[in-house]
Image (cartoon, rainbow, N blue to C red):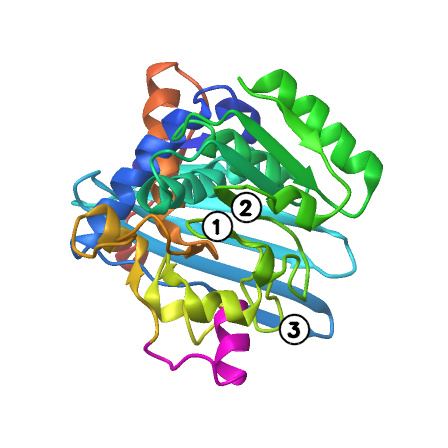
Amino acid sequence: MTDTLFLTSDDVSDLAKPGDYVEAVREGYRQVGEGAPAEPRTKLTNADPPGMLTTYAAVLPDTGAMGGYMYSAGFGAGDAWFMTPLFDAESGEPLALLDGASMNPFKTGAAGAVGVDALAREDATEIAVIGSGAQARGQLRATATVRDFEVGRVFSPTESSREEFAEELTADLEFPVEAVDSSAAALADADVVITATNASDPVIDDADLEPGTHVTAMGQYSKGKNEIPPETVARATYVLDLRERATQDAGAFLAALEAGLVDEDDVDAELGEVVAGEAPGRTSDEEITVFDSGGTGIETTAAAYMLYERARDADRGQTISFAPASEALTGR
């Protein structure tokens, strides 16, 4: 038997700030860029009873951890459940089992922030956010740690939602966030654009993107979900979290492919390759760059291990026991 730490969402909710997540996730992507294994999501759906199970995983040998994410949803229940198993990369022993709910917007936001840090212009000062939910909040909080923004703008279709977002984030961050009444108004003069929506059609117009803009799109993780126009994918330096996603579930890339604007190999790099210095990323101040962030086990494993270490040091969580395979299979 081995002791494993069980951590609830509340156990870990106050253990790290957005910048801490960004540092951990950047290190995870560096390892994958240098050859550590990670895989895109596997999504299983069922019609009767309606439901969905999604998994993805990564091994981060320098961190010393491997693990991933499992989340489930009963379509009739209107809710989902996040579970994160974490293992020792050398021994394979289970280190922790985390309820991944509270860390979800932070680790996902951190992946977007790493993309901005790797691909946006160094002198970026204006940021636009399309969407006003928890993921949009996580993206902006994390991205604010990698550039010195002077102003932010947010648009979402519901006026009260964008006003609430702007008020909350202005209070939290070191620059004002203004609610505006269109995506075009949000994008005007923006150096960085974040799309964090559930939209099935583009939420921005390609013509509204200024030369030199970076776009992080994180709401397009299945066919038919394409927050950004196919034309943007085609003309941008296009970077994915994992290259295999391009023809599997990267909705905007699949839309561009169907429109005949790109070929299957028109992916410029994976984010880890850029972070590790294996691919150039941005090469000029005028080019458009896109980071397509669909969710991977990289940010999940990196963030979970950081939280596990901090929870252990703070004496958080409960100990549960797991039997090794030798005991389970032999009964000894």
| Disc 3: which residue | 46
Residue 216 circle label: 1
Whether residue 73 is visible, yes or no, is yes
Image coords of residue 290 (percent x, y): 43, 56
Residue under the point 48% across and 71% down: 253
| Residue type indicated by callout 1 | Thr
- Residue type at the position of mark 2: Ile
- Where is residue 105 drawn, in percent x and y? 54, 38
Mark 1 to mark 3 CA distance (whole Å): 31 Å
Distance between mark 2 and mark 1 Cα atoms: 5 Å
Residue appearing at x 62%, y 72% in the figure: 224
Per the image, the residue denoted by label 2 is 194
Of callouts 2 and 1, the N-terminal one: 2
Q: Give the range drawn in magenta.
A: 251-265
Quadrant in which the N terminus is drawn: top left
Label 1 CA crowd tier, 10 Å (few <14, some 14–19, many 20+)? many
Q: Residue at x 63, y 60 (%)?
A: 205
Residue type (three-letter) at the residue carrying disc 3? Asn
